[in-house]
Image (spheres, coloured by chain):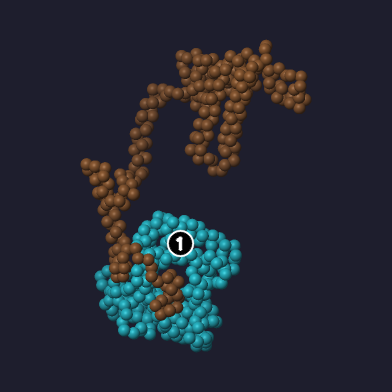
């Protein structure tokens, strides 16, 4: 075997870096699952899962692009390798068979891949990558979704059956009526309608206008018909004239604010 | 008993909105409250022997004595009202036995001073430097006999100063009592009367003390054992929590200590 060219070294280095990235993101997912209480939000889990999936995908592409090289080279310890201190690493490097656990994973991945992409004979594996193995298949196998990219007819039917009911019940729980933004309402709906050239104003905006009117009444004419002599006359947005401390003093000792 | 308090001033245009916000926050409908408050001022050191035995017995009286003995203070006598009480026409107080909280739509007006329940509320001057960010004061209250309280109060050495009406809405939020209220004054009738009114004017004639009709938001926690530092700390933390929650709506603050000074000079 000839010595490795710089290109080959680069390829190896790249594989190493991508694998490091994958280990990192897997590690951080595990830590966040172990340590955070309550569990991380579904959105952060999803982000992490998609990061991992991206990592896997880039590794898979990288491996399949360079599989000829990777298959043809093998590791041999150089004399200066610190065998005594790094015996473990050396053993790992010199293995010709996979670790039994890894063997299991690979076979599980292959099985899932086979069931996912029926007809396609491509098998995916880290070390015997065939060009036909698609990155998506790899993903499905390793992430363990099992279902692969496609849903069966039954699943689709079930989904269609479930979705409308669920969507409806979800919709009922919400308060609809957001045809206009608050900003638009403040500018005046009529004006917005004119600007946008709307042909008709939707019903729910009539309602919200009524609500606005009711609110105005609520401001001016109090809820329970109690007196409102000065309040309305002084203007809607008048700030209190008497400081709160003066009022508290009156409430405590009966000293009129004006007197002081 | 100790009271921890925070206050905020609420402009009248914000009142309705704040009511809704508080309703949402506390998940309860506002409880509308109307009270008439009489302010009494100590005029002389009370004399125990002077106490009339006819006004009532029991532990309440003993507590009252403790409360009123000592320094001279302003104190309040509070009587709950209902809106039906404000109708102008005086009722014949001797003929019928009207219950205050009753449902008397038929009898247009039915304020009966002689069966008005009263509660004596004593509030000490806020503690100096408890925590400069919160108002803390000693508080005590006791039930008083129904009807005319002036003779009893005079006997204890207190004289009537003035009275007003407080109207507002109350919310309970965990251990916090939130009271959004304002002071209403009776319509001016020449000179200030020297004793509590026996009849109430029409509610519409009452004018807010603060002319723009602004409200006061008061958040209070009552701590039974004021000497327990742990309880006091927890309570003030709860109040600060509420202050944070309401931060975008109102600014709850401690009140100026001297404005709540109840010492009579």
What residue is rendered at 57% in x and 68% in y?
A: B130
Q: Please state the chain letter of the residue tagged with numbered disc 1 in the rendered image.
A: B
Image quarter hosting the N terminus of chain A: top right
* Display colour for chain B: cyan
Please tell me whether residue A7 is drawn above or below residue B162 in the rendered image.
Answer: above
- Residue at point 40% right, 26% down? A155
Q: Secondary structure at mark 1?
A: loop
Q: Nearer the viewer, residue B11 or B143?
A: B11
Asked if residue A245 shows in the view, the reply is yes
> Left or right of A252: which side holds B17?
left
- Which chain's colour is brown? A
| Image vertical order of residue A20 relative to residue B178, above or below | above
Residue receiving disc 1:
B251
Position of residue A36 measured from the top left corner of the image (x, y, whole percent): 57, 42
Give the image location of residue A63, x and y in percent. 57, 20
Q: Name the foreground residue: B213 vs A163.
A: B213
Residue that lies at the very extreme toward the left in this rendered image: A199
A132 relative to B95 in the view: left or right: right
């Amino acid at each position: 075997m000839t010595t490795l060219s710089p290109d080959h070294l680069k390829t190896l280095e790249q594989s190493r870096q991508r694998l490091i990235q994958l280990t990192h993101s897997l590690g951080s997912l595990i830590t966040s699952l172990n340590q955070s209480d309550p569990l991380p939000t579904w959105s952060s889990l999803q982000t992490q899962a998609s990061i991992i999936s991206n990592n896997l995908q880039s590794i898979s592409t990288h491996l399949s692009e360079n599989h000829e090289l990777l298959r043809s080279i093998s590791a041999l310890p150089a004399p200066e390798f610190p065998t005594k201190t790094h015996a473990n690493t050396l053993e790992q490097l010199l293995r010709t068979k996979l670790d039994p656990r890894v063997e299991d994973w690979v076979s599980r991945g292959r099985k899932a891949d086979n069931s996912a992409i029926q007809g396609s004979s491509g098998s995916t594996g880290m070390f015997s990558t065939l060009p036909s193995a698609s990155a998506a298949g790899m993903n499905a196998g390793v992430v363990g979704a099992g279902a692969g990219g496609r849903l069966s007819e039954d699943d689709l039917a079930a989904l269609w059956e479930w979705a409308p009911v669920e969507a409806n019940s979800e919709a009922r729980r919400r308060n609809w009526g957001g045809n206009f933004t608050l900003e638009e309402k403040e500018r005046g709906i009529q004006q917005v309608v004119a600007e946008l050239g709307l042909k008709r104003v939707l019903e729910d905006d009539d309602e919200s206008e009524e609500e606005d009117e009711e609110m105005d009444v609520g401001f001016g004419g109090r809820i329970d018909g109690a007196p409102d002599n000065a309040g309305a006359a002084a203007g809607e947005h008048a700030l209190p004239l008497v400081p709160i401390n003066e009022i508290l003093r009156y409430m405590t000792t009966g000293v009129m604010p004006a007197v002081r | 008993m100790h009271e921890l308090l925070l206050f905020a001033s609420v402009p009248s245009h914000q009142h309705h909105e704040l009511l809704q916000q508080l309703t949402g926050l506390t998940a309860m409908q506002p409880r509308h409250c109307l009270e008439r408050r009489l302010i009494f001022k100590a005029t002389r050191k009370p004399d125990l022997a002077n106490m009339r035995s006819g006004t009532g017995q029991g532990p309440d009286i003993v507590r009252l004595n403790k409360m009123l003995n000592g320094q001279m203070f302003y104190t309040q006598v509070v009587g709950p009202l209902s809106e039906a009480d404000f109708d102008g026409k005086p009722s014949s107080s001797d003929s019928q036995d009207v219950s205050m909280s009753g449902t008397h739509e038929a009898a247009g007006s039915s304020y009966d001073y002689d069966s008005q329940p009263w509660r004596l509320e004593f509030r000490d001057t806020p503690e100096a430097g408890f925590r400069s960010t919160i108002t803390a004061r000693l508080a005590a209250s006791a039930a008083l006999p129904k009807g005319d309280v002036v003779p009893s109060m005079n006997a204890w050495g207190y004289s009537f100063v003035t009275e007003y009406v407080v109207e507002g809405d109350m919310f309970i939020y965990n251990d916090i009592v939130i009271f959004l209220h304002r002071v209403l004054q009776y319509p001016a009738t020449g000179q200030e009367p020297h004793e509590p009114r026996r009849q109430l004017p029409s509610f519409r004639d009452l004018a807010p003390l603060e002319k723009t009709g602004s409200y006061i938001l008061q958040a209070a926690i009552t701590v039974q054992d004021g000497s327990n530092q742990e309880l006091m700390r927890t309570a003030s933390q709860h109040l600060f929590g509420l202050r944070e929650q309401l931060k975008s709506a109102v600014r709850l603050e401690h009140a100026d200590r001297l404005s709540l000074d109840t010492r009579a000079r």
